[in-house]
């Protein structure tokens, strides 16, 4: 990784983390609206599992070269 990429992503780290948190919270709210009796802890675990699976898929795609010339 080049220094320029490291510096750029370091600047945006907080923004990336906040966006991920907002995605999680938005899905928690939607679940609560759609299923008011839902167990919030269970919903949170399921949402995190979905997010983790996608992150693992993205990692696999990166290793496979899918984003080399993105």
Image (cartoon, helix red, strand yellow):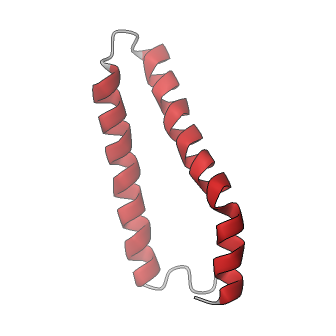
Residue 64 in which image quadrant: bottom left
Percent position (x, y) of residue 8?
Answer: 71, 74
Percent position (x, y) of residue 28?
Answer: 46, 28
Percent position (x, y) of residue 12?
Answer: 69, 62
Residue found 34% across the figure and 9% down from its top: 37
Relative to the observer, which residue lies in front, 54 or 7? Answer: 7
Q: Residue furthest bottom?
A: 2
Rendered-image quadrant of the C terminus: bottom right
Q: Is residue 47 left or right of residue 25?
A: left
Relative to the observer, which residue lies in front, 53 or 7? Answer: 7
Q: Is residue 10 left or right of residue 37?
A: right
Rendered-image quadrant of the N terminus: bottom right
Number of labels in the image equals 0
Q: Is residue 31 left or right of residue 4?
A: left
Compared with 13, 46 (above or below) is: above
Residue found 41% across the figure and 71% down from its top: 59
Percent position (x, y) of residue 55?
Answer: 41, 60
Q: Is residue 68 left or right of residue 44?
A: right
Compared with 63, 21 (above or below) is: above
Compared with 66, 52 (above or below) is: above
Residue found 31% across the figure and 26% down from its top: 41
Residue found 39% across the figure and 15% down from its top: 35
Compared with 45, 37 (above or below) is: above
């Amino acid at each position: 990784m080049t220094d320029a990429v490291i510096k750029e992503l370091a600047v945006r780290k907080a923004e990336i983390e906040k966006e991920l948190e907002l995605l999680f919270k938005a899905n928690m709210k939607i679940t609560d609206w759609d299923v008011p009796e839902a167990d919030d802890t269970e919903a949170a675990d399921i949402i995190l599992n979905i997010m983790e699976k996608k992150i693992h898929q993205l990692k696999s795609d990166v290793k496979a070269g899918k984003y080399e010339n993105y």
